[in-house]
Image (cartoon, rainbow, N blue to C red):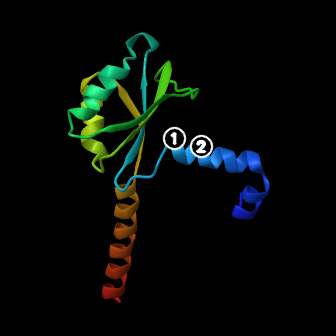
């Protein structure tokens, strides 16, 4: 939706305000979806796995998403750029990492594309 539509519709404006209040933007963060069996879910254990990597758990939400590998899918937001170390820690605790998104992976992909373009120009 555009900003004009959001400004006209108070419900959407309220939703955006509420969303920004619940999930404030931070500089360095990564988002993960993890899966587990319902009987094995423990929020404190997930937080401990994240904190083992010197990171802070910003959000932990049980979702309604479905995955073949897990009964329960949990969305995490962490104030750390190195999602790989957090994924390994969660794996050690018995949680399966289903998806990772971070601001650094977007930057890495952009840099990789630019480097490939530069190499093409140098080969000409």
Residue labelled with disc 1: 22
Q: Is residue 91 visible?
A: no
Q: Residue furthest right?
A: 8
Looking at the picture, does residue 31 appear above or below residue 115? above
Residue labelled with disc 2: 18
Q: Residue furthest bottom?
A: 124
For the residue carrying disc 2, how many other residues have a C-alpha within 10 Å: few (<14), some (14-19), or many (20+)?
few
Instruction: Give the residue displayed 57% in from the left and 44% down from the top.
Output: 19
Residue 80 in the image, given as x and y percentages of width and height: 30, 47
Residue 2 in the image, given as x and y percentages of width and height: 71, 62
Residue 122 in the image, given as x and y percentages of width and height: 31, 87
Secondary structure beneath label 1: helix
Q: Residue furthest top?
A: 39
In the rendered image, the quadrant that contains the C terminus is bottom left
In the rendered image, the quadrant that contains the N terminus is bottom right
Instruction: Give the residue displayed 43% in from the left and 15% down from the top.
Output: 37
Q: Dots 2 and 1: beta carbons under 8 Å? A: yes
Instruction: Depth check: give the residue in front, 64 or 17.
Output: 17
Kindly identify which numbered label has been placed on residue 3: none
Instruction: Give the residue displayed 34% in from the left and 67% down from the top.
Output: 112
Q: Based on the displayed image, in which of its 4 quarters is residue 114 positioned?
A: bottom left
On screen, residue 96 versus residue 38, left or right, reads left
How far apart, in angstroms, are the residues tagged by discs 2 and 1?
6 Å
Q: Is residue 93 visible?
A: yes
């Amino acid at each position: 939706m555009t900003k004009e539509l959001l400004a006209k519709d108070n419900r959407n404006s309220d939703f955006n305000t509420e969303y920004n209040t619940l999930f404030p933007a931070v500089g360095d963060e990564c988002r993960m979806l993890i899966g587990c069996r319902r009987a094995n879910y423990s929020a404190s254990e997930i937080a401990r796995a994240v904190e083992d990597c010197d990171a802070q758990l910003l959000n932990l939400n049980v979702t309604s998403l479905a995955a073949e590998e897990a009964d329960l899918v949990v969305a995490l937001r962490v104030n750390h750029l190195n999602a790989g170390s957090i994924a390994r820690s969660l794996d050690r605790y018995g949680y399966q990492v289903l998806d990772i998104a971070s601001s650094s992976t977007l930057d890495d992909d952009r840099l990789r594309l630019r480097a490939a373009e530069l190499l093409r120009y140098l080969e000409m």
